[in-house]
Image: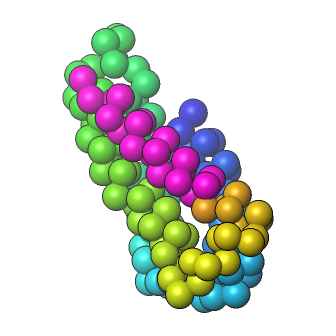
Amino acid sequence: GHNAVGFFLTAGFLGIMYYFVPKQAGRPVYSYRLSVVHFWALIFTYMWAGPHHLHYTALPDWTQSIGMLFSLILLAPSWGGMINGIMTLSGAWHKLRDDPILKFLITSLSFYGMSTFEGPMMSIQ
C-alpha cells in the first residue's frame, strides 16, 4: 500500500507543489538541492515503511521494527519538502494577504507537515 500512496499520490502532489508555489509566488524554489535530496529520500524510504500498519500481526517482529524505523526516518524527507515549499515564500510573505491560491497552497503544505508527523508517531510500537 505505501508504494502506491508514496509513489503515485505523494510524489504527484509534491510535483504539483514544486510547480505551483514558485509560479504563484513569483519566486524560485527555496533550495533545489533540498528538493532533489527530499525526492530521492522519499522514494527510497517509502517502500520500507509499509509494515508499520501491520504491528501485532503474524509478521515477524523484525519486519514490524523495520517498518517503524523507516516511518520515523520518513519524517525527515517529508518535512524537508514541506519546509522547502513554505520557504519558497521567503521575501514574498506579503503575497499571502492578497492571494487566495497561495493561501491554499501554504495551508495544504502545513497540513501535509502535520499529517507526515502523525504517521511516524503512530507507527511507534
Above or below, 113 relative to 69: below
Residue nearest the observer in this picture, 68 or 112: 112
36 relative to 105 in the view: left or right: left
**Residue drawn at x 30%, y 51% as measured from the top left:** 73
Q: Does residue 23 appear in the picture of this structure? A: yes
**Residue drawn at x 44%, y 56% as measured from the top left:** 78
Q: Is residue 63 magenta?
A: no
Residue 44, how many percent across, how many down?
43, 57
Residue 68, how many percent across, how many down?
30, 35
90 relative to 117 in the view: left or right: right
Q: Does residue 11 appear in the picture of this structure? A: no
Residue 26, how many percent across, how many down?
70, 87
Range drawn in magenta: 107-125
Above or below, 45 relative to 106: above
**In which quadrant is the N terminus drawn?**
top right
**Residue drawn at x 30%, y 44% as measured from the top left:** 72
Residue nearest the observer in this picture, 110 or 67: 110
Give the total of numbered labels: 0
Dominant SS type (magenta) = helix
Q: Quadrant of residue 79?
A: bottom left
Above or below, 54 relative to 124: above
